[in-house]
Each structure stands twice: as C-alpha cells, then as structure tokens.
Image: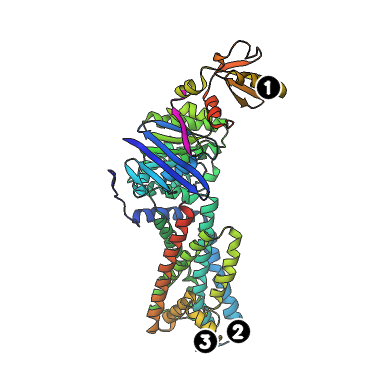
C-alpha cells in the first residue's frame, strides 16, 4: 500500500490554480523529495495532506484514509515539520514536546518527551525556554516535535529553508536517521542538494504538476546526460556560444554569470570551447532544464 | 469508507484537553502580569467610581450603597476585559504571527475542537477573574450570600460568549489595528450600557431596549441577584446568556474554519 496516493488533484485559489491535476504516489518506506521552485504548489500539496486545504477535484488517500473525510485519522499517524518555526518560545523545551504528545494522544507522555529530547540532543536543555535556544537547537526541536508520536509518515515542508549550512547539515543527519528507521518521508524542498542527498526518489514539480520523477541518478541520466560544460565569458561571447550550441541541437541553460551546455559529451568538435569547465551532470541541470528556473 | 475507516469523533475531550494544555503551559509564563492587570483594573474602577462618586454625588441606588452597587456591577467589566480582548488579540497573534494553529491543526485536532478549547480556557480564566471585584467589595461592607456561589458560573457562561465573539472578530479583521473599530463599536458601548455605574432605567427608552440585549447587562443583573436576592426573571437572563454563548461558539467556529481551512 502506498503511504500517499493523490489522483488528479486540483486546488484553486480564485483565478490561480496552485495544484493542477496532480498525480502522486509515495510508497511506504521511501523518502520522496518534492522539488520545485517557489510557487510550484509544494506547500499547497502539504496543506492538502494535512486537511488545511480542501481539494476542488481529485482523490486523496493518506495511510489508507480518504481525505478530507478521514483526515483526522490520517493526521494521528502522520508527523508534520513545518517550514516556519512555530514553537511556543516562552515555554520550556519539554513542555513544547509534552503539549504535542497530548495532542497526538500519546499514552506515556513522559517517555515520548524523553525520547524526543534524546533525538534532538536537548536533554540538558529540557527546562530552558525555547527563546534561550540557538537556531539549530530550535530546528532540531521542531523536527523532534513532529516525531513525538512516532509517526509512520512524516511531511517535511522545506525543512532547512533559510538556515545556515552548519544547521542544515545537522538536520540532514537527523533526517537521515529517520530514513534509516524506515519512516516514510515526503519532503518538499527547493534546495537541489537537499533532495540529492536525502531523497530516494525526486519528483520535480512546477505549475502544480509533477513533470518528472525518478531516482536522482536516473533523472540526471534521462534529462541531462553525463556531462555539463560551463563556460564563463563576456555576455556577447556567451550569446554567440549559446546560439552555436543550440543550433547543433544541444540544450543550454543559464548558470549565474555563465552558461551550461547540458549533455556536452554529445557535442561536435569545436562546439564546446577549450576554456569550458566540464563536470558531471547534476540534478541542478535537470531542475533548471525542466522548470526554467535558476536553482538554489 | 476507506480501509482505514473513521474512528475519531467530533469534539473529542482529548483534543480539547490537549489544546488547553498548551494554553496552561503558556499561562504559567505570563500569569503574574495578566492576573495583576485583570484584578487591579476593575479594582481601580471600583475605587474611583465607588468611592469617588459614592462619596460626593451618589449615596445609594435602589436602596443599595453605591460602592456595593458598582462592586457587583464590576464583575461584568472584569469578565468582558478578561475575555473579549485576550480572545481577539490572542487568537489573531497565534494565527497570523506565530502560526500556532497551523501546527495544532496538523495534529488530530479539528477547528471545532480548537475553537472550543480556546473559548473554554478563556471562559474559565475570565470567570475566575470576574470574582475579584466581588471579593474586594466584601471589604466595603457587602455581605457574602449563598446566591453568590453562582457568580463564577454566570461569569464563565458570559465569558464563553465574549471569547467566541473575540475569536470571530480575530478571524474577520484583516489587520490587528482594526480591533480599534471593534472596541469602539462593540466593547465600549456594551461596557457602558451594562448598568455597572448607573441603573439603566434612567436612560432613554431606546437605549434601555438595547441594554436588554446586552449580555453584560444581564450578567450585572444576575450578580446583583446573587448579592441582593434573585427574581424569577433571572432564569430567563441566564438562559439568554447560555444562548449568547452557544450562538457565539458556532459563529466563532464558522469564521475560524473559513480562515484556517483553504
């Protein structure tokens, strides 16, 4: 049984269609990265799964429960780690966890709090107000709060957005541990590296739809080939090189101040200039080619 | 119905208790300031009007010493200021600034349970704070009576209604500044025509009629009934307050559902 099954789901906000005929299956035990630019419909999809948005059309099933009718049953088995820090800042670390243990009807609240404190490595800070914690500690606590009832499925909504690299790495370690325990994870992100490191499969979403899905290596091989050549030069020269590459059927994408010729291993002699930096193709190449957006 | 099947009911006590436990955890961090202002404010009014006007202009109202008249009326003031205002601002801040409701609704808690818990918590708190003016008035010669034991219940029911009103307003306004309109158009007039500081039968006929629909006026009359003797009409007054609380509860749920569920 799939943990999440979405079929032809549509969600509109007035004239804007945020989710547009979305089909998405997440098998049990995998980490699926929902990768897309801002405004792709990722957060709306997350809200649909937690019953905080109601679909205009389509069918949604989470852990065997049909939404929205059995949303409450689904939410009882699902953990959510939100994009924004919504901890109670004046309340102690352990009370933050205890409140959510009660909301999730955990029988042994004390044991659940202790387990989460260990997970977040905050046992020594249990009686401190959240306000006194560092940014990294707060994010670890937020993640642990979503796991207080040992859910079968965890929704991570942009789990590391806006965090510095050190905190991001800390969280990736925690998410990695969660994955190794077999928990099903749906993680929305617009960070390529995050999806590449954590996700077993990646679904690229844009304009409310999944436009590509597969294991990162498969997506790269299918959409970007083996190599990408990055060329740094003056704008006029870049425009010239781009036109030349495209005229031979190669795909070229902007890469900040440079251009990147994707699938450059197929280029005819002379199309890729000698000064080009040739590297292995990445998921970022796939993302930019498919969505037309610059990656973060 | 799916294989998972519906097993969770509406208005589950566990969900309501869970939301209230969050309020209690937060309240432990700020109870001193809130209690100080909730208790002191009505006492200042009581002393200013009761002693000020009582000593200079008014000796008695309907055979009751003026400070005792005001003291019993101030229960309603304490109730509205401890329910409508915290409910409006608290709900708005938790929803718009702290994203607290997003986290709670991701758990197995529905909007109906969330609103019910918020109203219950504020109602209990305001019902408790509402007793303080009465206790202070004991020091100004008001005799305790058995009938006063019902005052916390009257305060609770009225506060539930005003908590619902506050939640509904928080779900309606677009910006926090718009609470100024709510306060000026509803809270202050209701407070002034409650019969706290002067009997409403001296007011123009139209205002008297409006006052009959003011839950605060009904609360004032019930508290005075508890202090000086109940009348048969007090049953109807209490029924009116219960109806007010129920109507506001449903309106608050409806408004918050529209606000929280896209």
How packed is label 3: few (under 14 Cα within 10 Å), some, or many (20 or more)?
few
For residue A12, side relative to residue A59 (left or right): right
Q: Position of residue B62 (x, y in %)?
A: 50, 88
Name the main secondary structure of what is drawn in magenta: strand
* Quarter residue B148 falls in: bottom left
| Observer able to see residue A51 | yes
- Give the CA distance from mark 1 to mark 2: 90 Å
Magenta part of the chain = A208-216
**Which chain hosts label 3?**
B
Residue visible at 34% across and 48% down?
Answer: A70
Q: How many numbered badges does the structure rendering display?
A: 3
Q: Earlier in the sequence, mark 3 or mark 2?
A: 2
Dot 2: element = helix
Q: Are marks 1 and 2 on the same chain?
A: no
Residue holding disc 2: B55
Q: Which residue is mark 3?
A: B201
Disc 1, SS: helix
Residue that badge 1 annotates:
A238
Residue A69 among those drawn in magenta:
no
Front residue of A252/B38: it is: A252
Callouts 3 and 2 on one subunit: yes
Q: Nearer the viewer, mark 3 or mark 2?
A: 3
- Name the chain under label 2: B
Which residue appears at 43% of the width and 39% of the height?
A: A22
Label 1: few (<14), some (14–19) or many (≥20) C-alpha neighbours in 10 Å: some
- In the rendered image, residue A118, in percent from the top left (x then y), is placed at 42, 36
Disc 3 element: helix
Viewer can see residue B148:
no
Instruction: Tell me how far mark 3 sits from mark 2, CA to CA.
Output: 22 Å
Which numbered mark, 1 or 2, is in the foreground of this view? 1
Position of the N terminus of chain A, as image quadrant, is top left
Q: Nearer the viewer, residue B32 or B223?
A: B223
């Amino acid at each position: 049984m799939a943990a999440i099954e979405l079929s032809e789901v549509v969600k509109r906000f007035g004239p804007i269609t945020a989710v547009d005929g979305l089909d998405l299956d997440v098998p049990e035990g995998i980490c699926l990265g929902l990768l897309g630019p801002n405004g792709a419909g990722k957060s709306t999809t997350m809200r649909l799964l937690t019953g905080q948005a109601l679909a205009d059309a389509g069918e949604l099933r989470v852990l065997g429960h049909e939404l929205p009718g059995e949303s409450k049953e689904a939410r009882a088995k699902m953990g959510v780690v939100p994009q924004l820090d919504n901890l109670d800042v004046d309340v102690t670390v352990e009370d933050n966890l205890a409140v959510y243990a009660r909301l999730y009807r955990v029988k042994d609240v004390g044991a659940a709090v202790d387990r989460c404190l260990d997970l977040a490595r905050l046992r020594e800070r249990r009686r401190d107000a959240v306000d006194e914690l560092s940014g990294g500690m707060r994010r670890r606590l937020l993640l642990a709060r979503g796991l207080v009832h040992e859910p079968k499925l965890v929704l991570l909504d942009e789990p590391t957005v806006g965090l510095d690299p050190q905190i991001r790495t800390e969280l990736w370690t925690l998410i990695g541990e969660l994955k190794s325990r077999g928990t099903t994870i749906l993680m929305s992100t617009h960070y390529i590296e995050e999806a590449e490191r954590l996700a077993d499969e990646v679904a690229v979403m844009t304009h409310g739809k999944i436009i590509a899905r597969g294991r990162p290596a498969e997506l790269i091989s299918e959409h970007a080939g083996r190599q990408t050549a990055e060329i740094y030069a003056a704008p006029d020269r870049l425009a010239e090189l781009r036109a030349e590459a495209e005229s031979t059927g190669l795909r070229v994408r902007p890469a900040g101040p440079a251009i990147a010729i994707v699938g450059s291993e197929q280029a005819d002699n002379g199309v890729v200039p000698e000064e080009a930096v040739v590297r292995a193709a990445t998921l970022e190449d796939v993302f930019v080619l498919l969505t037309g957006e610059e990656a973060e | 119905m799916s294989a998972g099947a519906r097993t969770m009911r509406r208005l589950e006590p566990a969900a309501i208790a869970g939301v209230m436990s969050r309020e209690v955890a937060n309240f432990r961090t700020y109870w001193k300031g809130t209690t100080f202002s909730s208790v002191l404010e009505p006492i200042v009014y009581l002393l200013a009007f009761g002693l000020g006007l009582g000593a200079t202009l008014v000796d008695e109202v309907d055979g009751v010493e003026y400070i005792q008249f005001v003291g019993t009326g101030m229960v309603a003031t304490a109730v509205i200021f401890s329910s409508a205002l915290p409910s409006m601002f608290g709900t708005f801040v938790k929803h718009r600034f702290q994203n607290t409701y997003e986290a709670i609704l991701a758990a197995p808690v529905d909007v109906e349970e969330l609103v019910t818990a918020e109203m219950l918590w504020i109602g209990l708190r305001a019902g408790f704070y509402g007793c303080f003016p009465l206790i202070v008035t004991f020091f100004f010669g008001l005799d305790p009576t058995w009938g006063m034991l019902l005052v916390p219940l009257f305060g609770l029911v009225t506060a539930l209604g005003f908590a619902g009103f506050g939640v509904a307003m928080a779900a309606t306004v677009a910006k926090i500044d718009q609470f100024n309109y709510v306060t000026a158009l509803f809270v202050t007039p209701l407070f002034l025509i409650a019969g706290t500081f002067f009997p409403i039968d001296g007011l123009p006929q139209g205002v008297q009629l409006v006052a009959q629909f003011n839950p605060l006026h009904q609360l004032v009359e019930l508290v005075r009934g508890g202090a000086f003797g109940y009348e048969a009409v007090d049953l109807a007054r209490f029924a009116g307050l219960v109806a007010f609380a129920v109507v506001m509860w449903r309106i608050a749920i409806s408004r918050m559902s529209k606000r929280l569920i896209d």
